[in-house]
Image (cartoon, rainbow, N blue to C red):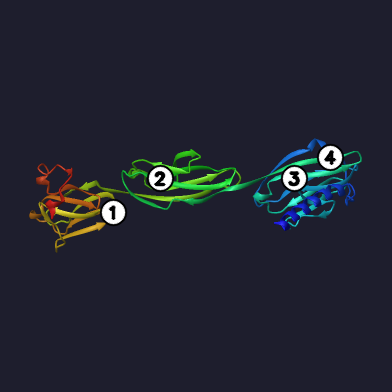
Amino acid sequence: MTMQVGRKSCWKQLQASFFRLLCLLPTGFPVRSVDMQRTTDNITIRQGDTAIIRCYVDDKVSRVAWLNRSNIIFAGQDKWSLDPRVDLVTKGQLDSIFVAFVQVDVYDEGSYTCSIQTKQKPKTSHVYLIVQVPASIYKVSEDVIVNEGSNVTLSCLASGRPDPIITWRLLNPSGIGYRFSAGWEEFLDIIGIMRNQAGRYECKASNDVATPDVKYVNVVVNYPPTIQKIQSSETPVGRVGMLQCDANAVPKPEFEWYRDEKRMTNTQSINIQMLGTTTILVFSNVSEEDYGNYTCVATNRLGIQNASVFLYSESRLAVLSGVLLQPVDKALFK
């Protein structure tokens, strides 16, 4: 403890000595008068760039020193700072004195003072260095899988100086997005999410310091099957007939075909094809016995839906002209 107190006391004495010595130190470079119209100034610089802090002098000045808060940076041309990023430069003949910081960081922000001794009295010029930091997203939600109707909260946390603005967009396949919010929206709440709200969500953090930082969250919404399209077939005897059934669902639906209560399977004359969210019942050689009403059943773990389609000849068109789309009890087809 005694050693620490002693160090602080020595440092205060050193600073006091500096101000007393300022009047005795040689300037070390040509000088001009203080530009008293620029006694206070702000410099805004981006983190990582080079900051130049200026002091304007003329031949009336005999002593010059730079201070950062209470720390001495330069006394004349003598460097007191141990920071290797700091250097002292002059511009032309009898012009300006510069302190240069290469790769400025946030801890460099603050007040800098150019202390000048003229023939009449000491004068100071103050500069305040403002360091800006580009927006950066440091945490974003993981991809989400939810059931339709659930509540979803997406988070996007970002840092920067000034504080970044967060915006959310839901991107569609063409790359054009619907903007959900703008402002200080780190969290996006979706109440009762619907299937049309599934997709890729873009979180953008911007503060006009640099290019905005962007991250993405994929949201998958599960929902039960919905049969979107059915296609009956008018096929003469002896020809190839096809019945088609398309359904949307997440997870992808599974299909079954029934005639009355009997489940259809692949045979020598009948083939069931599965193409993603489409199923096709193919008759390689239609007979009179094949004509009739068939049921397509689409299922996933969230639900079930069915639709009726018809294989018919022209003579039966008037009788078999309706297409039904209705719920079904899966137990009837087991």
The residue mark sitting in front, 4 or 1, is: 4
| Total numbered badges shown on the rendered structure | 4
The residue mark sitting in front, 2 or 4, is: 4
Mark sitting earlier along the chain (4/1): 4
State the image quarter where residue 129 is shown.
top right
Image coordinates of residue 306 in percent, x first then y, are 18, 48
Residue 123 numbered tag: 4
Label 1 residue SS: loop
Report the Cα–Cα distance between label 4 and label 3.
Answer: 14 Å
State the image quarter where residue 169 is shown.
top left
Residue pointed to by mark 3: 112
Image coordinates of residue 91 in percent, x first then y, are 82, 49
Image coordinates of residue 159 in percent, x first then y, are 55, 47
Residue 252 numbered tag: 1
> Which of the two residues, 290 or 107, is positioned nearer the viewer here?
107
Residue pointed to by mark 2: 153
